[in-house]
Every structure is written in C-alpha cells, then in structure tokens.
Image (cartoon, rainbow, N blue to C red):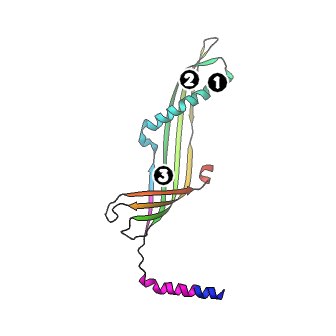
Amino acid sequence: MRARRLVFVLALSVLLAAAPSLQAQGHFEFGGHYGRWSLSLLGNTAEKLLNDATKDEIQDRILTDIQDSYPGLTLTSYDQTLNFNSSGDDFGFGFRFYPGGHRGSFSLGVSVEKSTFKVLPSVTSLMLLQDSGTLETAIFNGTAAASAIIKAISFLLTFRWDIFPSAVVHPYITFGGGISTAKALDD
C-alpha cells in the first residue's frame, strides 16, 4: 500500500513539475438566458388544427351521453368553437467548454433549464337534436374549459460546431439531448 502511494506521489510530482511547459488551450464560457413562448404567434392556425382534430370526438361523446338518457333524440346539426391559449417561460444557465481555445470551432455545453408550459383550451358546443317519434326539437349548449401546467427541470448536454469561429458574428450547428425529472409529469 505504501509503495502505491509513493508511486502516485512521484507521478503527481512529475506532472506538476512539467505543468509550466504544458499549454492549456481550453476556454470556458458561462451564460444564462430567459425566454417566453406562446403558440399564439401562429394566429388562428393552432386553434383551427385543434378544432378540426377534436370536433368529431367531442360531438360523439356529447351525443352518446345525451342518447343514454334520451334514446329517441337524433342529431340534426352541431357547431363547435375552440379557443386555445398557451404560454410559458424558460430560464437556465450553463457552461460551454472549447477544447481548442478561443479560435476552436467545437464546444461541449452543459446546462440546467427550468421550463413552464401552460395550455388553456376552452370549447363551446351547440347541438340541435330532434326526437324521431314526436319530431320535437332539443338544444344542447355547453362550454368546457381546462388548464394544464407543467413545470419541468431539465439537464442538457450539447455538442456545437461554430462556423467561422473567429468572426464576430457566426452561425453554428448544435446537437444535443437531455433528461428531465419525472415529477414534472406527475404534478
């Protein structure tokens, strides 16, 4: 055991003695950011897509519930309006290491992000029905609203290649991935 310690101390001493002749070229950068997002930037496109995707499903569920209590009623017309609001924010910090120094094009980044996602849809439905035996009409008018909020903490690892790294402004290509806590979906 003492022999191992002695070898370790000697090897460490040799490395420390040679350290002034070794040139470190790495460069670290530390940064933070904050941002807000919303699907409202898409205008009515998101609402129209969601309305088209959910219209038949909502209509069928309402009609099934009504016909369970009143089997003689049949659908004559249905209209649905969907309002969709979404928003959120994201803030984080991280550091990036350039192994090639200031002029190197490759870098490796690690960051921590805290994100909030809010989705607030509401639906208004108007259904006209008719009794097949008596020919009397019925109207169903309903509104439903929901909210979903997800707060997630994620840890990201990115690989970045700067194009024209010595230029003041330069584009870059980034690949990466991350993990998030499972608690974000449980809440």
Q: Nearer the viewer, residue 17 or 134?
A: 17
Q: Which residue is mark 3?
A: 89
Q: Which mark is residue 66?
A: 1
Gap between marks 3 and 2 measured at Cα: 38 Å
Q: Which mark is residue 127?
A: 2
Q: Residue at x 52, y 48 (%)?
A: 117
Gap between marks 3 and 1 measured at Cα: 41 Å
Question: Secondary structure beneath disc 1?
Answer: helix
Count residues near mark 3 (Cα–Cα under 10 Å), then give few for <14, some for 14-19, many for 20+. Answer: some
For the N terminus, which image quadrant? bottom right
In the rendered structure, which amino acid carries the disc numbered 3?
A: Asp
In the rendered structure, which amino acid carries the disc numbered 1?
A: Ile
Pointers 1 and 2 in contact (CB under 8 A)? yes
Displayed quadrant of residue 30: bottom left
Count of all numbered marks drawn on residues in the image: 3
Question: Secondary structure beneath disc 3?
Answer: strand
Q: Residue 48 appears at what percent x and percent y?
A: 46, 34
Residue 14 visible from this viewpoint: yes
Q: Earlier in the sequence, mark 3 or mark 2?
A: 3
Q: Which residues are magenta?
A: 8-33
Q: Earlier in the sequence, mark 3 or mark 1?
A: 1
Displayed quadrant of residue 21: bottom left
Q: Height in image: 61 above or below 20?
A: above
Q: Height in image: 19 above or below 57?
A: below
Q: Height in image: 81 above or below 152?
A: above
In the displayed structure, does residue 44 sit left or right of residue 167? right
In the displayed structure, does residue 72 sit left or right of residue 43? right
Q: Residue 89 appears at what percent x and percent y?
A: 48, 52
